[in-house]
Amino acid sequence: METASHIAVNGSDIFNYMQRYVGSDNQIQVVLEIDGCLDEHRLWKAIRLSASAEPVLGCRFVEHQEHPYWQPRADLDSISWGSLLETQDRSTAMDAWLSDLLDMDHDPMVKGCIIRAAGRDTLCLKINHTCSDVGGCIQYVHLLASLYQKLGVDPAYRPVPNLAERDQSKIFKQLGFTSDAWNTQQSPEPLGPGAPFTLGEAKYRRQSIRKIPMGTLTKLRDSLRQEGVTINDLVLAAYVRALYQHIGGTIEEPIRIIVTGDLRRYLPAQQVHPLCNLSGIIHFHLEDRPVGTYQDTVRKVSAIMKRSKDNKMGLSRAATFLEFLAQTEFSNVVKMMREARERSVKSGKMSPILSNFGIMSPTTILFDNLEVTDAYIVTTAEYAPGLMLGASTYRDWMTFCIAFFASNIATSWVDALLDTVVSDLCG
């Protein structure tokens, strides 16, 4: 229940909050290349006002043994929302900032950094995954650009708070997902082998990034258009082939991939929803190691994904699990998820994730008259043996990213995996 002093959490909030302990560093990052220099003071004010426009950004997630909740912060006008770093080495400065971690207990839900070099800015944003998935983060970029523009016209501008409900159960029903009670006795979805890793503390966060022109992908998709192949099918096929090459996998223990999807695409375009986590998942695997050409694998992947999307069983099961988390005492959720993490580390099994975040904007993003010339997502860094490949598109480029901890997973291994994905896609 929401009150004047609390905002209710939902199952996705709880699941993603727990990732800080058992799954990932829990921070989603956005990189925006700006054609010029921003007014940093106006930008920090815009970020501060975004916490008024989307109230969850102005809150802390409060752990409670029975039911956690969002508590509005009392220090929104005194905390730091961002920093300006002037440098002659943009690449090194960016890598350092992206590798830094949010303080999950004290930092606000969103922080920014302007990296300024040679008369041009790179705006980097960190957003706590507890309050939003990447779909929400992309929504946030457009909100921030709008606030920045409006403050340029009227420095006294104040946004109207978005008070739309964050109760996901209504959205799940709207999407036609079943509402059966979660059966705690049912067998969990089987996991496949994860990334090869070294045991130990997760340290030295890194990110490996590659870019390919969208024209390459659209040309390949168009050559298979009669078979209903999508861009996501192309990426998934390249990913599964790369994983078999670099991890292995057998008929008895196939590579299994968790494919995420933004559920907002199934809602009416005019429907207003708050900043939140609203993603579904599909569990994917091939029955056998892929053989033949890349195009052969694409056809198999496309057929499997079409069946999965048509029956909605995976999406519905995930929604039911999130509703179960929302109704379960938090102490029991903590116990359950920690036990799952222990089993994963012991067995080395954790199905890799593919998240194609889609197009960040159909038109050029503007901060007043300054164009965003490039934009991409830097994914959360998964705890080994977990692994996530993220893909985002802006203008004519698709950007691939894998974030990881170099203390557990070798940088050379991640680079080789990404290079294999790109090699298939580029022919």
Image (cartoon, helix red, strand yellow):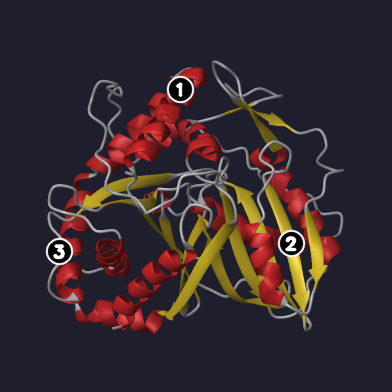
Q: Is residue 411 left or right of residue 422?
A: right
Distance between the alpha carbons at the discs numbered 2 and 1: 36 Å
Identified at 79% across, 49% down, the residue is: 158
- Amino acid type, callout 2: Cys
Question: Looking at the rendering, which quadrant does residue 40 occupy?
Answer: bottom right
Nearest to the observer: residue 51 or residue 82? 82
Whole-percent x, y for residue 290 in the image: 16, 65
Q: How many marks?
A: 3
Foreground disc of the pair 2, 1: 1
Question: Looking at the rendering, which quadrant does residue 57 occupy?
Answer: top right
The residue that mark 3 highlights is 300
Distance between the alpha carbons at the discs numbered 2 and 3: 43 Å
Lower sequence index among marks 2 and 3? 2
Identified at 61% across, 26% down, the residue is: 69
Whole-percent x, y for residue 99 in the image: 63, 58
Q: Which element is circle 2 on?
A: strand
Q: Give the quadrant of the C terminus.
A: bottom left
- Amino acid type, callout 3: Lys
Q: Which element is circle 3 on?
A: helix
What is the crowding at mark 1: few (fewer than 14 residues within 10 Å), some, or many (at least 20)? few
- Amino acid type, callout 1: Lys
Q: Is residue 410 visible?
A: yes
Whole-percent x, y for residue 201 in the image: 55, 44
Q: Is residue 147 left or right of residue 255?
A: right
Lower sequence index among marks 2 and 1? 2
Distance between the alpha carbons at the discs numbered 3 and 1: 39 Å
Foreground disc of the pair 3, 1: 1
Identified at 47% across, 74% down, the residue is: 210
Label ID, residue 113: 2
Label ID, residue 335: 1
